[in-house]
Amino acid sequence: MLILGIDPGLRCTGFGGIELVGAQVRLREAGVIRTGGGALSGRLCELTRGLREVISAFTPAIMVVESLYSHYKHPPTAILMGHARGVLIAAAAEEDIPVIDYPATRIKKSLTGNGRASKLQMQRTILSQLRLTKMPEPADVADALAVALCHANVLLHEARLAGRGTP
């Protein structure tokens, strides 16, 4: 099962594909979809095209994103991220790929046991869980892998509760 984690952004969207094989998690591919400057509509089109290419290359079973959250001090940021997130979710829906989202605190708690873990703690956990030789960079890639790993942990936990051992 390939789980595609996405960290939406208007200039740089991180993606991370992980495979769940039995109770083991393996990195399949990770990277970024970059958009140029210019009008919002053009960047949203580039994001859609970029995600379609990723979906075509890896055929994920599910796509996972972080829930939208923004401090009330920065509502324009939340609105812009909502645009990016919306076109990415729509692109997945067009391919009949289910989309799940998790709050940032749940993602952090799932990986580190601490819902307020720092970026560095998250990167170190990802490094360890995926047995990587170097930190995933840029941060958008690490965030995408974190959300994918969170969903893998949820699936593994549900399988253990059901007495199956594997999803």
Image: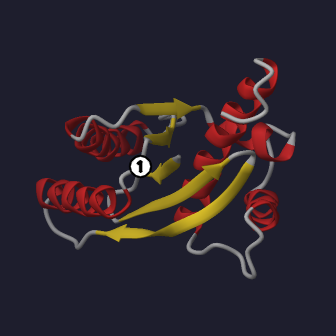
Q: Position of residue 75 (x, y in %)?
A: 41, 36
Q: Nearest the camera: 81 or 19?
A: 19
- Report the residue marked by disc 1: 60
Residue shown at the point (73%, 64%) measured from the top left:
130
Residue shown at the point (47%, 35%) measured from the top left:
68
Q: Nearest the camera: 139 or 80?
A: 139
Where the C terminus falls, by quadrant?
A: top right
Q: Position of residue 78 (x, y in %)?
A: 40, 39
Q: Is residue 72 visible?
A: no
Q: Is residue 49 visible?
A: yes
Q: Is residue 37 above or below residue 152?
A: below
Q: Nearest the camera: 120 or 48?
A: 48
Residue shown at the point (17%, 55%) measured from the top left:
40
Q: Position of residue 58 (x, y in %)?
A: 38, 60
Taking the image as shown, residue 162 lies to the left or right of residue 114, namely: left
Q: Is residue 138 above or below residue 4?
A: below
Q: Secondary structure at mark 1?
A: loop
- Residue type (three-letter) at the residue carrying disc 1: Pro
Q: Position of residue 17 (x, y in %)?
A: 51, 58
- The residue lying furthest to the right in this view is 113
Residue shown at the point (30%, 46%) measured from the top left:
88
Q: Residues within 10 Å of mark 1 (few under 14, many from 20)?
A: many
